[in-house]
Image (tube, coloured by chain):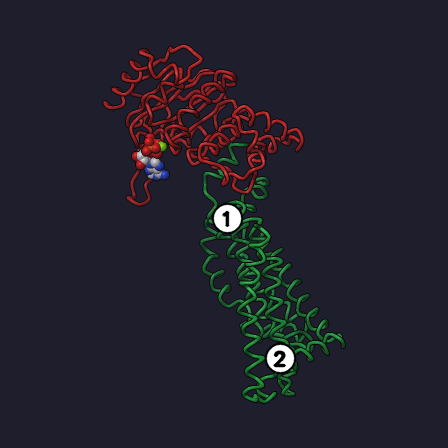
Chain colours: A green, B red
Amino acid sequence: MERTSRISAALIFIAPLAVLVALWAVVVPVFGVRPQIFPSVPAVGRAGLDSILDGSLLRHVAASVSRVAIGTVLAVLVAVPLGILMGVSRGVSAFLTPLMRFFSVLAGIAWIPIATLWFGYGFGAIVFVIFNAVFFVVAYNTLLGVSTIPMTLRHAAASLGAGRQAMLTDVLLPGALPNIVTGIRTGLGFAWRGLIAAEMIATDVGLGYMLFVARDFYQTEVIVLGMIVIGTLWLLIDRLILVPLERATIERWGLVSA
Amino acid sequence: MKSLSLKNLAKTYFDAYKGEHVTAIRDVSLEVPAGEFVSIVGPSGCGKSTILNMVAGFIPHSGGEILVGGTPVKGPGPDRGVVFQSFALFPWKTVLDNVGFGPKMRGVPKAERDAIAREYLALAGLSHAADRYPNELSGGMQQRVGVVRALANEPDVLLMDEPFASVDAQTRMTLQDELSRIWEERRPTVVFITHDVPEAVFLANRVVVLSKGKVLAEVEVPISRPRVWDRLVADDEFKDLSNQVLALVRSA
Ligand SMILES: Nc1ncnc2c1ncn2[C@@H]1O[C@H](COP(=O)(O)OP(=O)(O)OP(=O)(O)O)[C@@H](O)[C@H]1O
Ligand SMILES: [Mg+2]
């Protein structure tokens, strides 16, 4: 039962993508689309195979993924404690909330120009962009999460003997976790888009760079390959990291109706 | 187990919306000897929750004294266990970890506090639910966990603010039977707040009727124990006392 529903869910997910590929496989030869405009399915397949065999695809993917991973982990490590501290004090949170909202909106691509001025072209600038994309959203959501914990839960903890330390680790942090996870999801989305944009401008390796260079040589098959890889990697991040995180927190605890 | 004593307790709120002070508790003095069960009843807005929140240490009092075993109350503490109307279970902890939370705060090692929690869960017939999360339980079961969590921390005084108000009537009677049995076994000092006069009389040694921030009357409940609904529904003494308290509440 569980198994068949999983398989059918996977099929429902894949079906539209399969239709799209099939359409693409038919349209390109039938209308004689020139490869400078849009590549054929076999051309993209060959480009994929070539880039796997010469190791370039792995190099680009590794560069992009490691930048996102490092930027995100750093941002979460700083943003969560800060968000909780802000959430503990009503005054501080009232003061910082508008700032957090402002920077949450700016997060990502808008930081690229200034990042390249500060860090030059390369790793530092890109990780900085990722960091900003994740940091403000996660800090804001953590703050929000802490301030939405019902007062009775804090009272309950206090009357069971919780001190400052236990209030942080056993009540405020887990209580804010569903919001933190939501923040990470939004932030990673910003980060992933920001990454591709930043790599087009500020580096010589990575998926964004791969797309950008291919354009100069009219290699539409490499461009499309890159787009497919970018989309697929995001789906993997979603399925392998975000969804399990949400399952373990939000749904399990019944904090939203799943 | 310790006594609770309120001496000329008063509370004034500042109503920021109206920009004026509101007196919720005028002058309340009340003695609850160790091991006694006291119910407080009274019309909505008479100040029942205010008293309980002050005793729990959640809000400061404006005048008078609150003594637990002779020591003045300063803020919340594990000597006063609280059972909330909204249950207030930690959604991110299993039932076992909710009940073990108090012992954990006291520094009791994991294996030992699990044993304590299991013992108390068994007391309320909840052993089978130990590994579930609160949202997977019915309202009645959640409040059983709420009661057990407070008890497992072995407080000197147990404070309950309309704990059974949000469960259905059938479950409420079961919970009242269970609380009565647990009280008879362990004899904690209890302050129990309710709107429900029969509930107050069924559970308590003494019922305090509150009116407009003052004690209107105190009614002793000498009905013999063990008390169970099967016996008390048809008991004349119980009916008379309930009617007497009901008349007082109506006049309040
Ligand atoms: N935070 C507050 N600010 C201002 N006034 C308050 C506040 N809390 C309670 N009051 C007022 O104090 C009075 C007593 O309130 P309290 O909640 O103690 O009543 P209660 O007896 O518990 O009522 P109920 O039976 O409806 O729960 C009410 O008039 C209420 O409006
Ligand atoms: Mg109340």
Q: Residue furthest right?
A: A54
Is B165 on the left or on the right of B251, as rendered? Answer: right
Judged from the image, the secondary structure of the residue bearing numbered disc 2 is helix
For label 2, the residue is A41
How many marks the image carries: the answer is 2
Expressed as whole percent of the image width and height from the top left, the position of residue A101 reads 47, 61
Is B248 on the left or on the right of A223, as rendered? Answer: left
| Amino acid type at mark 2 | Val
Judged from the image, the secondary structure of the residue bearing numbered disc 1 is helix
Q: CA distance from mark 2 to mark 1?
A: 50 Å
Residue in the image at 50% along x and 63% along y? A104
Expressed as whole percent of the image width and height from the top left, the position of residue A209 reads 65, 78
Q: Subunit of mark 2?
A: A
Residue B129, numbered circle:
none
Q: Residues within 10 Å of mark 1 (few under 14, many from 20)?
A: many
Q: Quadrant of residue A126?
A: bottom right
Q: Subunit of mark 1?
A: A
| Amino acid type at mark 1 | Val
Residue in the image at 68% along x and 70% along y? A61
Q: Residues within 10 Å of mark 2 (few under 14, many from 20)?
A: some
Label 2 or label 1, whichever lies nearer to me, is: 2
Expressed as whole percent of the image width and height from the top left, the position of residue A228 reads 61, 73
For label 1, the residue is A146
> A57 and A66: which one is in front?
A57
Relative vertical location of residue A26 with respect to residue B230 in this rendering, above or below = below
> A155 and B200: which one is in front?
B200
